[in-house]
Amino acid sequence: MMHGRFALPVMLIGTLFLGALALTGLNFIHHLPTQQWLNALMQPDRNNIDQMVFHFSLLPRLAVALLAGAGLGLVGVLFQQVLRNPLAEPTTLGVASGAQLGITVATLWALPGGMFTQQIAAMTGAVLIGLLVFGIAWGKRLSPVTLILAGLVMSLYCGAVNQIFAIFNHDQLQNLFLWSTGSLSQQDWSNVTFLLPRLLLGFVLALLLRRPLTVLGLDDGVAKNLGMALSMVRLAALGLAIILSGMLVNAVGIIAFIALFSPLMAKLLGARRLVSRMLLAPLLGALLLWLTDQCVIWLTDNWREISTGTLTALVGAPVLLWLLPRLRTGAVPPPLSQGDRVPAERQHVLWWVLAALGVLLLLAVSALSLGRDAHGWLWASGELWHQLQPWRAPRMVAALAAGVMLGVAGSLIQRLTGNPMASPEVLGISSGAACGVVLMLFLVPGDAFAWLLPAGSLGAAVTLLLIMLVAGRGGFSPERMLLAGMAFSTAFTTLLAMLLASGDPRMAQLLSWISGSTYGVDAAQALRTALVAVVLVVIAPLASRWLTILPLGSATARSIGVALMPARFSLLLLASALTAAATLTIGPLSFIGLMAPHIARMLGFRRALPQMVVAALMGGGLMIVADWGGRMAAFPNQIPAGLLATFIGAPYFVWLLRKVK
């Protein structure tokens, strides 16, 4: 009986250990002959560069991988136990991104104190984002779905802030951002001596909390009947997990998913008791990160350099998709026809649309006329106005067209999926389109605009199709669709980062585009974008009947005579083409596709066609404002319109999470 119980864990741990050990030996031999290992370990020859690299880089890197993996495993156990959420970990909760943002601020401001100050900054960033995410979900009893969605959106928000810092301080922060993607490269033993005592202390504190945490994992009512102070226990455990997370991010950057998989693997191996998971998960985390990092070293020696965090994200995202059907979700968001305090359906829609067109025209004229120069604010007119239009008009037209397309795409996707929190950005469809565009740039030389739209559309369509398939496994729900989209977005973002770091000269021009900059748009590009927008947007109203019926359910749609497969496929292609065309102009992040349909709905436009028209106008207006604000906010420098829209969109999405019951 005992033999059968422990056979699988021993076999898995042994396999991981032997695999990591064999790969480590292979990598060590590549750098240093075996007969020199002992001497390089004990007393390296300072005149032998290979021995110095072995002693001060390879060995401490191995030690840091073991320590960081064990720490992440422990952090994952704490988060998942306290929150009763199998998907909780520093990356999905936004804590890791908060720590990274804190380090960026400390580096940028050159705060005194060296490593100690940087550590405090990392912990402060982690704590602030953690408090925000937990505060959002607290009113919903720490709902697993709300926690993960809030955490992942806050990760995107912190990433947008970091991108803005990078744009204005690229040279100062370049090495920091390369490291923060999850690099275990070492130059000495300082990280080992820093992590070892602190992780041991954290492990001891976690063991001291094992009994109250065990009770807490059962039920709030049971814990209260036993006289336990729930808030104090949660606060202590979450505080410990967040502090350890900040410390690990400060040491090795963001390593995704190790903290997620280690506790889950421990459970699958039969570790039902909390104390067993506290012992087994750190061991599994250490082995997983050790093996992953040795794979990275082998790839670096034989192919090209990638970060350890990049590899864990690329491997972890598919596993997250596999876990989604096993996640218990709460109540679904309200149907699109309902909403909190949504006014009655607007009458005289044509007059409202004409009024919105008037506001849009006013915004366009203001964006073309109002600006700044060395002497202050300036309203351009006459000859000066005409002189400025070759620079202002193309980017304004492109931003307007992209906003219109995202507004329509958001309306289509929300009605196609029946999910009021879906959008091209949230579901990762924009990132899928961006991946299609980037991959096409590798295949087609020169001006490949004619190929970029089909490539982006294909990437967006494949992403949306996969999301719908994955979300349907184990019972379709809007929450699973959102989480599937977040997983795809994480994988695509990581892939894009790896391509950008490849050294290919074609990737340099994509950095500003990915951040949503319209700075380089010329008249020809603006005209092409506007023409594509006109063609696609004119097609969209033809699907208004489908969009009205599909949210009512498959059975109702069939009874009315709607052919579900052709209807869904046509809407999928149209939404994908709209998303791809907009992404070509303003990059993969903006949240316009989320905000515009909701603003239209809150204004009382709930029927499919009026909502789509108003969402298009709202999206265009928001992007005009974002583009103009990006030019003015940091004059004479410029903030990409897509990033500025993200500053508005991410808080809006978080507010929407709190609002939806």
Image: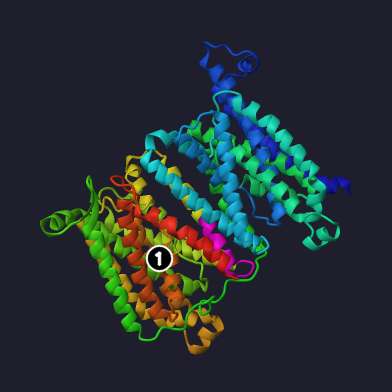
Q: Which residue is painted at 47% across and 80% down in the image?
A: 343
Which residue corresponds to mark 1?
A: 576
- The quarter of the displayed image where residue 192 is located: top right
Q: Is residue 477 within the magenta segment?
A: yes
> Which percent across, then down, holds residue 17?
69, 36
Q: Residue furthest right?
A: 1
Taking the image as drawn, is residue 136 in sight? yes
Q: Which residue is painted at 54% across and 34% down in the image?
A: 118
The answer to whether 136 appears left or right of 651 in the picture is: right
Q: Residue furthest left?
A: 383
For this rendering, which residue is in front, 7 or 379? Answer: 379
> Which percent across, then down, holds residue 425?
45, 60
The answer to whether 429 appears left or right of 328 in the picture is: left
> Which percent across, then down, holds residue 58?
58, 26
Q: Main secondary structure of the magenta part?
A: helix
Above or below for 478 versus 88: below
Magenta-highlighted residues: 473-488
